[in-house]
Image: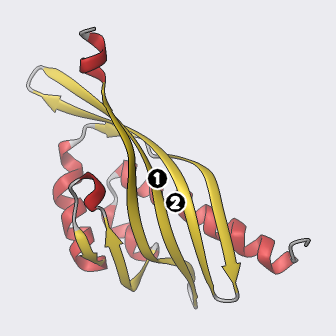
Amino acid sequence: MPLSLQEMSDRFEIQDMLFRYADIIDRKAVDELNDIFTADAHIDYSAFGGSVGDRESTLAFLKQALPAFSASQHLNANVQIAVDGDSGTGRVMCFNPMEMPLGEEKQVFMLGLWYVDSYRRTTEGWRICSRKEEKSWVFNVPDFMSL
């Protein structure tokens, strides 16, 4: 069945929001996530040892955790979005290399994960109302370099 213009627009708006999320995280501009998550959002980053909770506690966690990384890139792909009126669901693949300084050395981790999301249309636009990370794999670059 062909997509309606409204559904195409909704999917593009959600996709743009997902890419903004990745950019915000990589810039460590945590307060901008208030424009990504609903006020009542539930966020579960426990797949990689992170926090589980509401928007406020998640932002507090990210403000503490993100400075440990000198660089990161959240690269989203295989964005699968389903929209039903003012709500939607999604599954988004993410490839995330992260660099962590360790004294004079740097450690690089590469993470493979999926975001499993629920979205809600608000008066300000589409927002994430639920996000759960699902772990796929973790690779430590220095482990590879020592082979």
80 in relation to 142, above or below? below
**What kind of residue is marked 2?**
Arg
Percent of width and height locating residue 22: 46, 54
Q: Is residue 6 above or below residue 64?
A: below
Image vertical order of residue 85 relative to residue 67, above or below: below
Q: Mark 1 — residue?
A: 23
Picture residue at 64% right of the left edge, 61% below the top: 80
Query: Label 2's element?
Result: helix
Give the image quarter of residue 59: bottom left
Q: Quadrant of residue 53?
A: bottom left
Which residue lies at the image location 29% right of the left edge and 12% below the top edge?
145
- Camera-side residue: 4 or 24? 4
Q: Give coordinates of residue 71: x percent, y percent.
A: 32, 37
Image location of residue 16, percent across then percent down: 62, 62
In the displayed image of the protein, which residue is found farthest to the left?
103
Between 97 and 66, which is closer to the camera in this rendering? 97
Q: Where is residue 14 in the image (x, y as percent from the top left)?
A: 62, 69
Give the residue pinned by disc 2: 20
Separation of disc 2 and disc 1 at Cα? 5 Å
**Front residue of this view, candidates 100 and 146:** 146
Q: Which residue lies furthest to the right in this view?
A: 2
The kind of residue tagged 1 is Asp
Q: Residue at x 12, y 28 (%)?
A: 102
**Are the residues at dot 2 and dot 1 in contact (C-beta closer than 8 Å)?**
yes
- On-image quarter of the N terminus: bottom right
Q: Is mark 1 on a helix, strand or loop?
A: helix
Q: Residues within 10 Å of mark 1 (few under 14, many from 20)?
A: some
